Amino acid sequence: MLPRRSLLPQSLLCLIQVYLTLAQHTQLTLDNLASFSASTLPNPPTFSLPTSGNLSVSIALCSSQATSLPRFFLTNDSSISQPGPSDLGQPNVYEIFLDDFGLGNWTGPVNSQGVLAVSNIGQSTFEVGVSNSAPLHQLLDTLPLLGDTTSNQAFLFSPPFSPPSYTAPTYPNYTLPPANLTFPATPSPPPDFTMFVIPTSQSVLSSMPHTGCALSAAASTGSNNVVTQPTSASQGMWLRDSDGWRWQWLVNGLTPQTNYTAYAVQDGAKVSGPINFVTKTASFSCPIVHSLPFCPSAAWAVPLPAPSDPSQGHNAHTLPSSLVDPLISVLTNFTTMLTTFPCGRDEYSPLVSCADCQAAYRTWFCAVSLPRCGEFPPTAPVAAPSAPATSSALPQQQPAQQPLPALMPQPTSVPPRSPFLPAFPATYDALLPCLETCNAVDRACPPFLQFKCPLPKYTASASYGVGYIDSGNEGEMGGGSTGAAQDRWGNVWCNAG
Ligand SMILES: *[C@@H]1O[C@H](CO)[C@@H](O)[C@H](O)[C@H]1NC(C)=O
Ligand SMILES: *[C@@H]1O[C@H](CO)[C@@H](O)[C@H](O)[C@H]1NC(C)=O
Ligand SMILES: *[C@@H]1O[C@H](CO)[C@@H](O)[C@H](O)[C@H]1NC(C)=O
Ligand SMILES: *[C@@H]1O[C@H](CO)[C@@H](O)[C@H](O)[C@H]1NC(C)=O
Ligand SMILES: *[C@@H]1O[C@H](CO)[C@@H](O)[C@H](O)[C@H]1NC(C)=O
Ligand SMILES: *[C@@H]1O[C@H](CO)[C@@H](O)[C@H](O)[C@H]1NC(C)=O
Ligand SMILES: *[C@@H]1O[C@H](CO)[C@@H](O)[C@H](O)[C@H]1NC(C)=O
């Protein structure tokens, strides 16, 4: 006999089972963050997943007790209604493990029915998100960027997004950007970023997960000294360099000489960071200068009189025209001189163009014309840098011994390095430009301009930070003592511009 009679009731049974189990599960909806604790978790603690050829399920822990972490089990097998520890090892049953930040994810096909089950919720709260594209919760692989600090402020950038598309100019109409740059249209809609700034010593940092929902929760209690900066508190979007647009914030109300930890969180769920920075001593008196279209990467403390609203720093509108006009004029004249070369028709290098020369010159010129104020680290530093400020690996044990920053005392008797800068009534320590910023111009510009940088082994260290990025040996790239102008831990050695 053919097993016909038993087949039909069996599949009917399956179907009934599917409907029964479906009815029991709380349905998760796509592209939506839902958060749960013991008191809001459905009973049984299971969720049904939307079907998708490639579903991403992500979990973020919002609060937890270190002693007892919840576990998350997932199945895309319709015959299992509440996957748990005892189902592990069966095909199509998965556990979502949480990483050190408190983030976890699973990506795969859910063709007929999928279930997410939670066990051991305890006192924890968590957030779950499901998506047809990338996981809603993630650790971004780009970091926020520190511009600079004063005694009670920090100038911070989100990680970059929407890199601009440049079309290189071509001969015979080889037109270079004007000295006073105009930016292309801002990305629309822009990504939403919130910056969280927390004193590094704050114990909440070591006890909580480092997720968007945990940071928001820590900020909302008001007792953790978490400074929250949504995009609405920002200085707007800024095209600092070819990496792309960034939100930028001038964070006020910080404590002098304090190490802070900063995270940028996109859409409440994508975490970028952490980075550290240290505020200056209370006597530090140089204001932050930022948002200059002619010097787009400048965002640092400059020896200038305080702006009328110190909480906003100086920007292109508050700087005296006796400073701005000559800066634009020099950049304009440089561009005029550069384009006496038949740019785009003749090549002076197989690697670089007149546009590269102009960009490198702008960066260097801004770094030397807008001196940066710095400060010696208050205590003998113990940690040495490892990764430059672009990697997002977690803190590692670092070798001792760390170079001091390239600081040069500037007594009031010394005339300012930049002839356009008004006299500054106090002594300060100048954080010198990195020599590499000068060498970049030398490498990018046609030889007829005769742009020359001082040689490392002779006079360079009087006016530049030497040997940090590239080794101190003449013309040798790489191998410097720190490998970068600054790192993600808040050490700053020279001004890259
Ligand atoms: C479950 O996921 C596995 C691997 O991710 C996949 O091979 C399988 O086809 C999926 N099953 C269903 C029913 O979606
Ligand atoms: C599924 O989505 C992930 C994350 O977006 C992606 O990396 C992966 O390539 C996708 N897989 C398939 C088979 O489309
Ligand atoms: C998803 O989880 C894996 C570890 O299971 C991790 O390596 C990966 O980075 C996570 N993906 C995202 C986008 O966070
Ligand atoms: C030359 O290029 C610039 C910028 O790309 C453009 O604005 C201008 O119209 C062009 N001029 C001619 C004559 O093509
Ligand atoms: C520079 O350009 C900005 C707009 O990008 C404009 O507001 C400002 O007035 C210009 N400054 C000078 C000195 O031309
Ligand atoms: C730029 O060139 C113009 C015209 O040659 C000149 O008048 C001006 O002084 C130059 N600007 C600077 C800052 O050298
Ligand atoms: C700030 O604190 C972190 C964590 O303790 C540390 O790794 C970092 O070196 C400190 N930064 C500075 C500049 O002291």
Image (spheres, grey):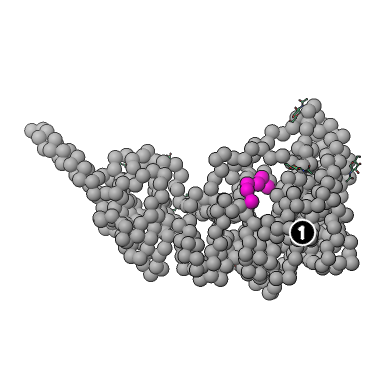
Q: Is residue 88 visible?
A: no
Q: Is residue 148 above or below residue 178?
A: below
**What residue is shown at x 83% (from left), y 60% (from top)?**
463
**For residue 265, side relative to residue 116 (left or right):** right
Q: Residue furthest left?
A: 1
Q: Residue furthest front?
A: 308
- Residue 131 appears in which quarter of the rendering? top left
Q: Residues within 10 Å of mark 1 (few under 14, many from 20)?
A: many
**What residue is shown at x 44% (from left), y 42% (from top)?**
133
Q: Is residue 64 above or below residue 73?
A: below
Task: Pick whichever, 3 or 235, lies toward us.
Answer: 235
**For residue 385, side relative to residue 101 (left or right):** right
**What residue is shown at x 89% (from left), y 64% (from top)?**
414
Q: Position of residue 363 (x, y in %)?
A: 76, 49
**For residue 395, side relative to residue 181 (left or right):** left
Q: Which residue is mark 1?
A: 302
Q: Residue furthest bottom?
A: 379
**What residue is shown at x 45% (from left), y 48% (from top)?**
136
Q: Is residue 470 above or below residue 340?
A: below
Q: Image quadrant of ligand 4? A: top right
Asked if the magenta segment contains residue 202, the reply would be no
- Locate the N terminus by quadrant: top left
Q: Position of residue 395 (x, y in %)?
A: 56, 63
Question: Would the CB of label 1 be found within 8 Å of ligand 5?
Answer: no
- Residue 423 appears in which quarter of the rendering? bottom right
Q: Position of residue 496 (x, y in %)?
A: 73, 54
Range drawn in magenta: 235-240
- For badge 1, the amino acid type reads Val
**For residue 16, side relative to residue 105 (left or right):** left
Majority SS type along the magenta span: strand
Q: Secondary structure at mark 1?
A: loop
Q: Is residue 52 visible?
A: yes
